[in-house]
Amino acid sequence: MTLHTHTVLLLVVTVATALVGSTSAFAPDSYSKLNVRITSSPSSSSLSMAPRFDTSTERWFTDVPEEMNGSSYGPIGSLYRAGPKPFLQRIFNPDTYDQAVLKYMAQDGCDRKEAQGNMDAFLENPQDWAYQKMEEKKGAAQKDYANANMAPQQVILTTVWACVVVVFFYDLVTGVAEGRYGKTDGNDIFHGNLWSLPF
């Protein structure tokens, strides 16, 4: 394998590692534990306005346009609010993400933007999100995940910082692939010559 192949493989492994998450947490709970209306079909006459779970398709759904996918912020909004994990989750697993948002909306009775903000925070750091929710139940101030990191100054700072990081990693990857970094006198760390490097 060439040096370029190793670099591409390293990038693929890194992205795959970032994508592996606890998406199974978004599967519907047992129906007896849910505090939502469960219907047998979307055409039932007893539909409420909140998202519902259809037992025949085993999927969450809504008929309200304000609650449907695309009615709130997009993947870039997730990137700004909570970072790359929820952004990548939305890109590579959009249906799982949407099902999780609909389930959260149904269980908490909130709007789509708030549910997306909470899902993004959960995907970024489940432990911190769960801790914050426990503290809120004890009376702590409720964190506004729907508008997190969206102040104009924060958006500008995040954009500049992201550009710096992208340029740095682009230079690092291309530099390693071209032999500018990690190569000394014909030896490099990708070809099993770690012990012969001069350091």
Image (cartoon, rainbow, N blue to C red):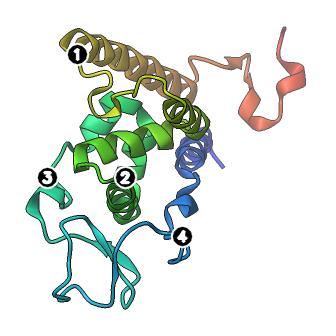
Disc 3 marks which amino acid? Ser
Task: Classify 179 as above or below 75.
Answer: above
Residue at image coords 47%, 69%: 34
Kindly check if marks 3 and 4 are in contact, taking CB atoms under 8 A apart as contact: no
Which numbered disc flags the more N-terminal residue, 4 or 2?
4
Which residue carries the number 2 mark? 108
Disc 1 marks which amino acid? Ala
Closest to the observer: 187 or 110? 110
Which residue carries the number 4 mark? 33
Which numbered disc flags the more N-terminal residue, 1 or 4?
4
Task: Classify 65 as above or below 74.
Answer: below
Disc 2 marks which amino acid? Asp
- The residues bearing labels 1 and 4 have C-alpha atoms spaced at a distance of 38 Å
Label 3, secondary structure: give it.
Answer: loop
Q: Residue 71 carries which label?
A: 3
- The residues bearing labels 3 and 2 have C-alpha atoms spaced at a distance of 18 Å
* Mark closer to the observer (3, 2): 2
Which numbered disc flags the more N-terminal residue, 3 or 4?
4
Which numbered disc flags the more N-terminal residue, 1 or 2?
2
The single residue placed furthest to the front in the displayed view is 139
Label 2, secondary structure: give it.
Answer: helix
